[in-house]
Amino acid sequence: MDMMKPSTKEDIQNGVVATSYGNIPSTTQKCAQGICIEVSLKLGCIVIFILASLCYINSINGSFVFDDTEAIVNNEDAKGKTPLNEIFFNDFWGTSLHHRSSHKSYRPLTILSFRLNSMFGGLNPTHFHLTNVLLHSICCTLSLIIFATLLKESRPRLSFVSAVIYSVHPVHTEAVSGIVGRADLLCGIFYFLSIYLYAKHLDAGSLTSFAGSMASCTVAMFCKEQGITVLGVIAVYDVIRSVSGTLNLGTIIKRRDILQRFCLIAVVGMALLYIRLSVMGSTGPPAFQRVDNPASFADSMMTRALSYNYIYSIHALLLVWPQWLCFDWSMGCIPLVKHVMDLRNLGSLFFWIVTFSAAFRALFSPSQRQRKFLTLGLALMAVPFLPATNIFFRVGFVVAERVLFIPVAGYCLVLVYGAEKLCAFFPSCRYSKLLILRCCLLSVVLTFGFKSFRRSLDWQDEGQLFLSGLKICPLNAKVHYNIGKNAADRGLRDVAIDRYEKALELNPDYDQAMNNLANLLKDLGRFQAAESWLLKAISVRPDFAAAWMNLGIVQALLRKHKEARMSYLTALSHRRKYPDCYYNLGNLYLELERYREAEEAFRNATLLQPTHVLAWTNLIVMLDNTGQSQRSQSTALEALTILPNEANLHFSLAGILGKQGQFKESERHFLSAIQLNPHSPIYHTNLGVLYHRWKKFQKAEQSYQRALSLDPQWKSAIENLKLLEKAKQK
């Protein structure tokens, strides 16, 4: 095939041959030799691997934070609780891709990596974090190989400096220290591998290398959607590598070998897009909320355009000076740019002036070396960022540091080339001026490295992470919401209520904050206020199933049984597979003494979630209390086959057997419950009652005394102990 042929004599005569970038160093290249000492590729890889690991080594002690909980802890696919093939039909969060609430983020290979972590180490966050650090170090090591390949450096200098800066850049912190950033790390590895193999294909014309490059692109895309953009990067690299002189469309069209490669790349790209769109199902793109990406919901096209451009400039600023890092930039963190006279437009204007100037130099510079650096650098910055631009589809974020994981590589190339050009302006490259330049680069590396190390500490704990976000985005309602949620989890109700109220002050339509605030008010006995907030939540989002269920719970507590039933049924109409709602509906029917319907509701809960202990327990107790002891016993045994180590089920079965006079079996289950939960006074008390009825008074007394040692005020143990003393005196 022509695409594999080396440059021909005719190509040479036409002046369009693939060139190496010269063995005779230019003045600029000579100056570049002073920027960094020459290192072997092997030594460079070792240094980069160690450096990348050191920057984030402290993240190994972190826990599951922020999105990690939903993506891993609450994701049955990630925990290996579902059949393996399910990961190819569910989104990143474990929801079916065909479900209308699906996020549509399709990253099955990333989920597979989580599954392997769970298989070998359980839900131990240390193993997950260690894997992330290792993957990041591998990716950074690959970056050196890529830079050396692109720059044709067999003994890296500029590529080594670029890789060092890439390794320590603080914008990577979210991808490395946040476990869900695994998607970016895996995507980055195969992204770089695809570029490397394509470069090898251009060197030797090997179809194997080309196929490997396309396969790596496919794997990258199944780790994160951004991976498909590598096809654009390698197309740009192909042109800059194969065409000498000023770039123009006419020259490219005349090259049949380039066009053939482009056709194959296009076929692969279309095939991958078809696969991606097919797995997404017929429900269309994800339905994000206004709070996730306010600019995309703006009615005015001018507001959208101005806001988008300002957001692009913020991303660019994070590359240049990553001082302002935040885990979430939504909900008012960046107010919309609504007017042309808004001073923030100056930032957008400056961003585009710099970008277009660099692009002009990349296309029309008389220096082949400058064209190479700028074109590759801009391609690596711009092409991977395209999915985040809101141009092709709406995205679910405003600013996201993770989407810069690959574009940082392009920035590093441009930065180091800028340092090389700066060096060229020094007369004769005198030592003192070179020393100043080296010190500047070293200060960048040290500053970035320290910032990465410090920032990864914030990601160790949710409390620290959320508070750090408050410093950057005090107007972000979601930051206040997350601080409130974290405080509630730690039992700090007053702090949680204050933060939720602040979130609602910043965003009066924040339905999730309303729901969580209502739950806290319910726990404090403020049922009327809780009901009011929940009614507001469902008015903002009528399909908010959790709010409908919580409204039903509050209405049941207010004795509004009819309204509570309708709220539960409405919740189930919006989320059919909702075991907690069936459980609460069963409790309502139980309170209304509608036992058949209660049993049906509890059964639905256990069918949808076989490990729903409370549903099993209430079903068992209801059957026993309604005189169906045999069914109650068989239900308890059924539950224990699913949950053999659940103390409450052993306790319930022990009570049933005790009533039936099966003291020996009852004792066995009481002891099993106590072994599983030795600190429950009620378990010891009821075991004492069993011994009391069994006439084993000494054991009964020991059980009562044990209950009182756990809780000296345990009333039933005190009363039963008195009855035991009377029985012993007879």
Image (tube, grey):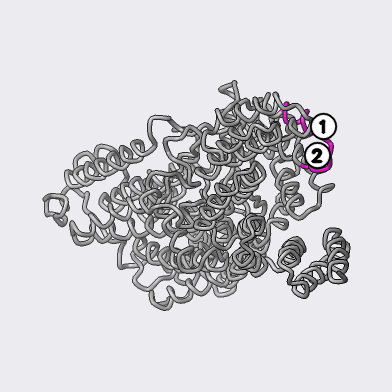
**Category of crowding for the residue at label 2, using alpha-carbon neighbours closer than 10 angstroms: few (below 14), some (14–19), many (at least 20):** some
251 sits left or right of 182 in the view: left
Quadrant placement of the C terminus: bottom right
Q: From the viewer's side, name the closer residue of 323 and 611.
A: 611
Q: Is residue 202 visible from the viewing direction of this image?
A: no
Write down the region rendered in magenta: 520-536
**Category of crowding for the residue at label 1, using alpha-carbon neighbours closer than 10 angstroms: few (below 14), some (14–19), many (at least 20):** some
| Number of numbered callouts drawn | 2
Q: Secondary structure at mark 2?
A: helix
Dominant SS type (magenta)? helix
Q: Quadrant of residue 670?
A: bottom right
Point out which mark residue 529 bears: 1
Q: Are marks 1 and 2 in contact (CB under 8 Å)?
A: yes
Residue in view at x 47 percent, y 59 percent: 114
Q: Residue furthest top?
A: 300
Residue in view at x 76 percent, y 39 percent: 517
Query: Image height check: is 462 above or below 622?
Result: below
- Find out whether residue 414 is within the magenta segment: no
Query: Image height check: is 176 above or below 576?
Result: below
565 sits left or right of 81 in the view: right
Kind of residue sitting beneath label 1: Ala
Q: From the viewer's side, name the closer residue of 706 and 584.
A: 706
Residue in view at x 67 percent, y 36 percent: 590
Q: Residue furthest front?
A: 730
| Residue carrying label 2 | 521
Q: Quadrant of residue 600?
A: top right
Kind of residue sitting beneath label 2: Leu
Q: Quadrant of residue 292?
A: top right
Q: What is the x, y in percent for residue 510? A: 70, 33
